[in-house]
Image (cartoon, rainbow, N blue to C red):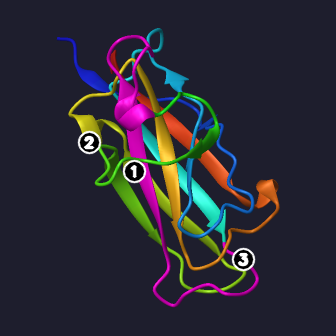
Amino acid sequence: MTTSQELLTNNQSITISLASLGSGSYQQSAAIDNTSNLYFDAAVQFAIKTASSGVSSTGSINVYAYGSANGGSNYTDGCSGSNASFTPTSPTNLKLIGVINAVANSTTYTGGPFSVAAGFGYLPGKWGVVVQNNTGAALDSTEGNHLKFFEGQQVQSA
């Protein structure tokens, strides 16, 4: 009898620039192509460092998902599929998949893993994330102080 079990990939980088992202600002990642790997979900995780001063005691970082069901011609809420700043519609059509509390200066906060498929009910052929900084200050200015990656999930027969 064949059984199915989860198969996890090695961590893969998400291309998104978070260094000095201003408070109240959004940054979208480059789109990730799922048309050949055919993951049924992707678990995204971040380790984000706050600024050395000005962080609010009620600060947070929102993580949203965007996707495309037509090969990247159209993405959720007008995302471009590129690593770039972004201004969503209000209220946004992006799918909130996680919130990272970030309430102190010069501290690295790890959030996730957050399921992308949970936002849509499935993992689109092309997808990405949008990060919104609500900490009260710009994020740390060194890109290497921010980790961003995902783990793809597949099914294997055993």
Q: Which of marks 2 and 3 is in front?
A: 3
Residue 87 position (above or below residue 158): below
Residue 49 x %, y % = 68, 69
Question: What's drawn in magenta, residue-wise?
Answer: 50-78
Residue of label 1:
114
Give the quadrant of residue 158.
top left
Residue of label 3:
51
Are the residues tagged 2 and 3 within 8 Å (C-beta)? no
Secondary structure state at the residue bearing disc 3: loop
Amino acid residing under circle 3: Ala
Residue 29 or 118: which is nearer the viewer?
A: 29
Residue 158 visible within the image: no
Residue of label 2:
118
Residue 128 or 7: which is nearer the viewer?
A: 128
Residue 145 position (above or below residue 121): below
Residue 112 x %, y % = 45, 57
Question: Marks 1 and 3, how far apart in space?
Answer: 24 Å
Amino acid residing under circle 2: Ala
Residue 119 x %, y % = 27, 42
Q: Does the magenta stretch include residue 98?
A: no
Residue 140 or 117: which is nearer the viewer?
A: 140
Amino acid residing under circle 1: Phe
Question: Marks 1 and 2, how far apart in space?
Answer: 8 Å
The residue lying furthest to the bottom in this view is 57
Query: At x 63% / y 63%, what residue is drawn?
Result: 48
